[in-house]
Image (cartoon, rainbow, N blue to C red):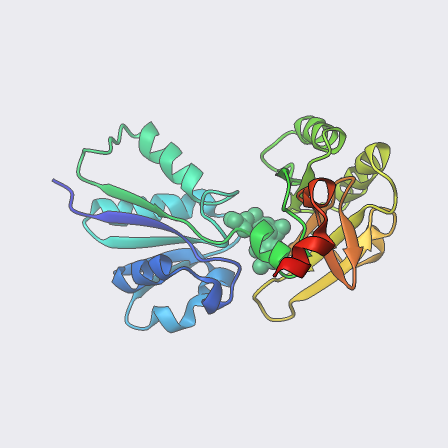
Amino acid sequence: MCTGKLMVIGIGPGAPDEMTLRARSALESADVIVGYKTYLALLTPWLTGKKVVGSGMMQELQRCAEALKRARKGERVALISSGDAGVYGMAGPVYELLLESGWRPDGGLTVEVIPGVTALLSCASRIGAPLTHDFCAISLSDLLTPWTVIEKRLHAAASADFVTALYNPKSRKRTEQIVQAQAIFLHHRTPDTPVAIVTAAGRERESTTLADLATMLTHPIGMQTTLLIGNSTTFVQSGVMVTPRGYSDKYDLGKAMERT
Ligand code: SAH
């Protein structure tokens, strides 16, 4: 009977203080840590005394397979994802590979998914309260998803007035998707709709910029950027981006303050 364990860990955006306690304990309990090199570099304090298996960007499936192989041999394996492992992360391919190979939850090999702070949450917290009403996330990466599908979702989100987080907006090779996304949103929303552009939250060279739909492309956007596009009620005041929950329609906010 296999006694190994695979822990799929979301490490948060990058800063150690934005990693959950559960993720920390899981890392500490692991025999081996498997992950993309850039993320391993964020985990230096946890790597001492562990076996470490790092790999490059395009080797996601190999990383999952390696982690599974080791867990099947009886090791306690930590497979790491940035943010949350279930949001455009490793938890999906892990379960796909496992189920493909006939794995069952009661079959010996234990799998645990440990949640982390996903980019849209860490990025939102840096700019105010942009996600306080209905929102959605769309990845602009068409490496595994056809662009026609992404385009349809952009139109649906924009027309339904969701606050929208755009993940994977741009890379060195993929530069056109963000241009098309902007055009789709401009079709449904006004040019002055607030857009937050957050890059490398919790990492070196973190930056947060407030722009709007009309000007968003004049700012640097890269692989480590998440964009948060406001809905039709989102506003910016004193450098803070807020999507109202609707209290001001029902209550007199001035009076509410007087009562405190
Ligand atoms: N599992 C991750 C997402 C991986 S997809 C999560 O839950 O956050 C990679 C995309 O996530 C990047 O292109 C970027 O859009 C976003 N992202 C990841 N880390 C980020 C960070 N520290 N700051 C800003 N955006 C980030």
Q: Residue at x 48, y 48 (%)?
A: 59
| Closer to us: 69 or 256 | 256
In the rendered image, the vertical position of residue 209 relative to residue 194, given as above or below = below
**Looking at the image, which residue sits at the far left?**
1
| Closer to us: 13 or 176 | 13
Q: Is residue 127 visible?
A: no
In the rendered image, the vertical position of residue 234 relative to residue 103, given as above or below = below
Q: Residue at x 48, y 61 (%)?
A: 39
In screen coordinates, is 41 left or right of 260? left
The picture places residue 36, in percent across and down from the top left corner, at 47, 56
| Closer to us: 252 or 124 | 252
In screen coordinates, is 10 left or right of 107? right
In which quadrant of the rendered image does the C terminus lie?
bottom right
Q: Residue at x 72, y 29 (%)?
A: 160
Q: Residue at x 15, y 46 (%)?
A: 3
The picture places residue 169, in percent across and down from the top left corner, at 69, 47
In the rendered image, the vertical position of residue 207 relative to residue 103, given as above or below = below
- Please identify the quarter of the rendering in which residue 19 is found: bottom left
Q: Is residue 156 visible?
A: yes
In the rendered image, the vertical position of residue 54 relative to residue 135, given as above or below = below
The picture places residue 102, in percent across and down from the top left corner, at 27, 27
The picture places residue 38, in percent across and down from the top left corner, at 51, 62
In which quadrant of the rendered image does the N terminus lie?
top left
